[in-house]
Image (cartoon, rainbow, N blue to C red):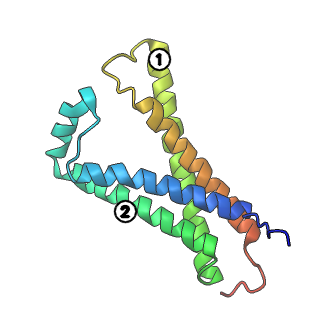
Amino acid sequence: MSPVRTTASPGILWAVLVGIWSLIFAAPHFYWALGGRAGLGTQAAAADAALQQGWFATYNLAAGCLGILGALVALVLAKRWGSQRVRRWLLIAATAACAVLLLRGMLGLTLLGVELLKGTFDEQTPAVLLAIEPWFVVGGLAYGGMAVHQRKAAPTNNPSH
């Protein structure tokens, strides 16, 4: 008897990628919301100044919650829970997340490129931005891939649900 081999659909794989991306995105935001600064190196002083302002903790707490929400959206879409109407709204939310993340990432990469071309990218510019900006693009592509593949997999037999 040969083992049964199953392959996950592209929609499931994209949803897993979105879930992982979202949880990784949420983790440092919760850490920063709680006052964490380890690993910031020369940017620790700027982080200290930001942490003294209430909006910074609120911003990071909200960003962390959005990351958890994104992972839940991916789970609901992957498991095909909820009515067709709920899934449609979640697909709209995933598409909006795709657009916002791509816009954020591309804007950040463009600004970094301008700094590099002008020669103003120096030790004062946090090198971590070279990883963070593409991270937003990866997230946008993941949300977009999930939305596209989940739409293809969505049943269309009863539009009223």
Q: Is residue 6 left or right of residue 80?
A: right
Q: Which residue is mark 1?
A: 116
Residue at screen point 66% across, 64% down = 12
Residue at the left extreme of this rendering: 52
Q: Note whether residue 107 is visible.
A: yes
The residue at 45%/57% (across/down) is: 23
Locate residue 149: give its quadrant: bottom right
Residue 65 image label: 2
Give the SS element for disc 2: helix
Q: Residue furthest right?
A: 1
Nearest to the eye among marks 2 and 1: give it: 2
Looking at the image, residue 115 lies above or below residue 155: above
Q: Where residue 95 appears, x then y in whole percent?
A: 60, 59
Label 1 sits on a secondary structure element that is helix
Q: Position of residue 54 (x, y in %)?
A: 17, 52
Residue 30's disc number:
none
